[in-house]
Image (cartoon, grey):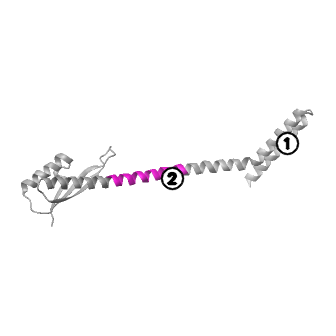
Amino acid sequence: MDFIRTWLIGIVAAGIVAAAAHTLTPPGAVRRVVRLAGGLLVLLAVVRPLVLSQWQSLALSGAEMERQAQQYAGQAKQAGESVMKKIIEEQTSAYIESEAKTRGLSLRAVVEVQTPPGQETPLPYRVRLILQGKSGTQEKNSFADWVDNTLNIPLDRQRWEEGG
Protein backbone atom coordinates (compact mmCIF):
# COMPACT_ATOMS: atom_id res chain seq x y z
CA MET A 1 0.00 0.00 0.00
CA ASP A 2 2.93 2.35 0.70
CA PHE A 3 4.15 1.80 -2.84
CA ILE A 4 0.85 3.03 -4.37
CA ARG A 5 0.68 5.98 -1.96
CA THR A 6 4.24 7.07 -2.82
CA TRP A 7 3.58 6.58 -6.52
CA LEU A 8 0.43 8.75 -6.44
CA ILE A 9 2.18 11.48 -4.43
CA GLY A 10 4.94 11.53 -7.08
CA ILE A 11 2.38 11.91 -9.88
CA VAL A 12 0.56 14.73 -8.07
CA ALA A 13 3.83 16.53 -7.29
CA ALA A 14 4.94 16.27 -10.93
CA GLY A 15 1.55 17.63 -12.01
CA ILE A 16 1.81 20.58 -9.61
CA VAL A 17 5.34 21.44 -10.78
CA ALA A 18 4.26 21.19 -14.43
CA ALA A 19 1.18 23.37 -13.85
CA ALA A 20 3.18 26.00 -11.93
CA ALA A 21 5.86 26.16 -14.62
CA HIS A 22 3.17 26.43 -17.31
CA THR A 23 1.42 29.25 -15.44
CA LEU A 24 4.60 31.24 -14.80
CA THR A 25 5.86 31.22 -18.40
CA PRO A 26 4.78 33.87 -20.87
CA PRO A 27 2.60 32.85 -23.81
CA GLY A 28 4.33 31.78 -26.99
CA ALA A 29 6.89 29.21 -28.04
CA VAL A 30 8.49 29.01 -24.59
CA ARG A 31 5.16 28.12 -22.97
CA ARG A 32 4.62 25.29 -25.49
CA VAL A 33 8.10 23.88 -24.65
CA VAL A 34 7.38 24.15 -20.91
CA ARG A 35 4.02 22.45 -21.43
CA LEU A 36 5.73 19.61 -23.33
CA ALA A 37 8.39 19.28 -20.62
CA GLY A 38 5.70 19.26 -17.92
CA GLY A 39 3.78 16.54 -19.76
CA LEU A 40 6.95 14.47 -20.03
CA LEU A 41 7.61 14.99 -16.31
CA VAL A 42 4.13 13.72 -15.41
CA LEU A 43 4.51 10.80 -17.82
CA LEU A 44 7.84 9.94 -16.25
CA ALA A 45 6.26 10.02 -12.78
CA VAL A 46 3.56 7.62 -13.98
CA VAL A 47 5.83 5.05 -15.68
CA ARG A 48 8.85 5.34 -13.36
CA PRO A 49 7.86 2.43 -11.06
CA LEU A 50 7.23 0.19 -14.06
CA VAL A 51 10.59 1.04 -15.64
CA LEU A 52 12.47 0.60 -12.38
CA SER A 53 10.86 -2.74 -11.64
CA GLN A 54 11.79 -3.94 -15.16
CA TRP A 55 15.43 -2.91 -14.68
CA GLN A 56 15.53 -4.51 -11.24
CA SER A 57 14.13 -7.77 -12.58
CA LEU A 58 16.60 -7.64 -15.47
CA ALA A 59 19.45 -7.07 -13.00
CA LEU A 60 18.24 -9.98 -10.89
CA SER A 61 17.87 -12.25 -13.91
CA GLY A 62 21.35 -11.22 -15.07
CA ALA A 63 22.82 -12.12 -11.69
CA GLU A 64 20.95 -15.43 -11.76
CA MET A 65 22.23 -16.16 -15.26
CA GLU A 66 25.79 -15.42 -14.14
CA ARG A 67 25.40 -17.75 -11.15
CA GLN A 68 24.04 -20.51 -13.38
CA ALA A 69 26.82 -19.98 -15.92
CA GLN A 70 29.42 -20.37 -13.16
CA GLN A 71 27.65 -23.50 -11.93
CA TYR A 72 27.59 -24.99 -15.45
CA ALA A 73 31.24 -24.06 -15.99
CA GLY A 74 32.13 -25.89 -12.78
CA GLN A 75 30.16 -28.94 -13.87
CA ALA A 76 31.81 -28.90 -17.30
CA LYS A 77 35.24 -28.63 -15.70
CA GLN A 78 34.47 -31.60 -13.44
CA ALA A 79 33.23 -33.64 -16.40
CA GLY A 80 36.33 -32.74 -18.40
CA GLU A 81 38.59 -33.72 -15.52
CA SER A 82 36.74 -37.01 -15.15
CA VAL A 83 37.15 -37.79 -18.85
CA MET A 84 40.81 -36.77 -18.74
CA LYS A 85 41.43 -39.08 -15.76
CA LYS A 86 39.73 -41.98 -17.55
CA ILE A 87 41.79 -41.44 -20.71
CA ILE A 88 45.05 -41.23 -18.74
CA GLU A 89 44.15 -44.39 -16.82
CA GLU A 90 43.33 -46.33 -20.00
CA GLN A 91 46.33 -45.10 -21.98
CA THR A 92 48.76 -45.73 -19.14
CA SER A 93 47.32 -49.22 -18.60
CA ALA A 94 47.74 -49.98 -22.31
CA TYR A 95 51.32 -48.62 -22.22
CA ILE A 96 52.22 -50.80 -19.22
CA GLU A 97 50.67 -53.90 -20.81
CA SER A 98 52.51 -53.25 -24.08
CA GLU A 99 55.85 -52.79 -22.32
CA ALA A 100 55.26 -55.93 -20.25
CA LYS A 101 54.59 -57.88 -23.44
CA THR A 102 57.89 -56.72 -24.97
CA ARG A 103 59.62 -57.98 -21.79
CA GLY A 104 57.93 -61.37 -22.00
CA LEU A 105 55.39 -60.75 -19.23
CA SER A 106 51.69 -61.33 -19.68
CA LEU A 107 49.73 -59.06 -17.39
CA ARG A 108 46.76 -56.75 -17.10
CA ALA A 109 47.31 -53.31 -15.60
CA VAL A 110 44.71 -51.23 -13.78
CA VAL A 111 45.96 -47.69 -13.23
CA GLU A 112 44.58 -45.13 -10.79
CA VAL A 113 45.37 -41.44 -11.32
CA GLN A 114 45.36 -38.51 -8.93
CA THR A 115 45.89 -34.81 -9.39
CA PRO A 116 48.88 -33.68 -7.32
CA PRO A 117 48.34 -30.63 -5.09
CA GLY A 118 48.94 -27.40 -6.97
CA GLN A 119 48.65 -29.05 -10.39
CA GLU A 120 45.79 -29.37 -12.86
CA THR A 121 46.80 -32.50 -14.75
CA PRO A 122 46.14 -35.89 -13.17
CA LEU A 123 49.09 -38.30 -13.11
CA PRO A 124 49.35 -42.07 -12.64
CA TYR A 125 49.41 -42.68 -8.90
CA ARG A 126 48.78 -46.37 -8.22
CA VAL A 127 48.77 -49.53 -10.35
CA ARG A 128 47.39 -53.00 -9.91
CA LEU A 129 49.34 -55.52 -11.98
CA ILE A 130 47.58 -58.82 -12.54
CA LEU A 131 49.89 -61.52 -13.90
CA GLN A 132 48.23 -63.72 -16.51
CA GLY A 133 50.84 -66.44 -16.61
CA LYS A 134 53.93 -67.66 -14.83
CA SER A 135 56.86 -65.32 -14.48
CA GLY A 136 60.04 -65.31 -12.51
CA THR A 137 60.77 -63.07 -9.59
CA GLN A 138 63.61 -61.41 -11.46
CA GLU A 139 61.38 -60.39 -14.42
CA LYS A 140 58.74 -59.14 -12.01
CA ASN A 141 61.25 -57.11 -9.99
CA SER A 142 62.81 -55.69 -13.15
CA PHE A 143 59.39 -54.63 -14.43
CA ALA A 144 58.44 -53.14 -11.06
CA ASP A 145 61.60 -51.00 -11.23
CA TRP A 146 60.67 -49.94 -14.78
CA VAL A 147 57.19 -48.85 -13.58
CA ASP A 148 58.81 -46.91 -10.73
CA ASN A 149 61.43 -45.19 -12.90
CA THR A 150 59.30 -44.57 -15.99
CA LEU A 151 55.90 -43.75 -14.55
CA ASN A 152 56.99 -42.55 -11.11
CA ILE A 153 54.80 -45.13 -9.36
CA PRO A 154 56.93 -46.39 -6.46
CA LEU A 155 56.93 -50.02 -5.32
CA ASP A 156 54.66 -49.29 -2.36
CA ARG A 157 51.92 -48.14 -4.78
CA GLN A 158 52.26 -51.18 -7.05
CA ARG A 159 50.07 -54.12 -6.17
CA TRP A 160 50.98 -57.41 -7.80
CA GLU A 161 48.41 -60.18 -8.09
CA GLU A 162 48.37 -63.64 -9.59
CA GLY A 163 45.60 -63.87 -12.19
CA GLY A 164 44.18 -66.61 -14.35
| Extent of the magenta region | 65-84
**Mark 2 vs 1, N-terminal side:** 1
Query: In what quadrant of the picture does the N terminus appear?
Result: bottom right
Furthest residue in direction front, as rendered: 102
Q: Is residue 56 left or right of residue 10?
A: left
Total marks shown come to 2
- Depth check, mark 2 against mark 1: the one in front is 2
User: Is 74 covered by the magenta stretch?
Assistant: yes
Q: Main secondary structure of the magenta part?
A: helix
User: Helix, strand, or loop for circle 2?
Assistant: helix
Q: Residue at x 18, y 46 (%)?
A: 150
Q: Is residue 18 left or right of residue 80?
A: right
Furthest residue in direction bottom, as rendered: 164
Q: Position of residue 45 (x, y in %)?
A: 77, 45
Q: Position of residue 12 (x, y in %)?
A: 82, 46
Report the Cα–Cα distance between label 2 and label 1.
47 Å
Residue 16: numbered disc? 1
Could you tell me the amino acid type at mark 1?
Answer: Ile
Residue 133: numbered disc? none
Q: Residue at x 51, y 52 (%)?
A: 68
User: Is 102 covered by the magenta stretch?
Assistant: no
Q: Is residue 141 left or right of residue 79?
A: left
Q: Residue at x 15, y 56 (%)?
A: 101
Q: Is residue 120 left or right of residue 106?
A: right
Q: Which image quadrant for residue 14?
A: top right
Could you tell me the amino acid type at mark 2?
Answer: Gln
Furthest residue in direction right, as rendered: 27
Whether residue 51 is visible to the viewer of this picture, yes or no, is: yes
Q: Position of residue 163 (x, y in %)?
A: 15, 65
Q: Residue tagged by mark 2?
A: 68
Q: Using a 10 Å C-alpha cutoff, classify the residue at mark 2 as few (fewer than 14 neighbours), some (14 to 19) or many (20 or more).
A: few
Front residue of 12/73: it is 73
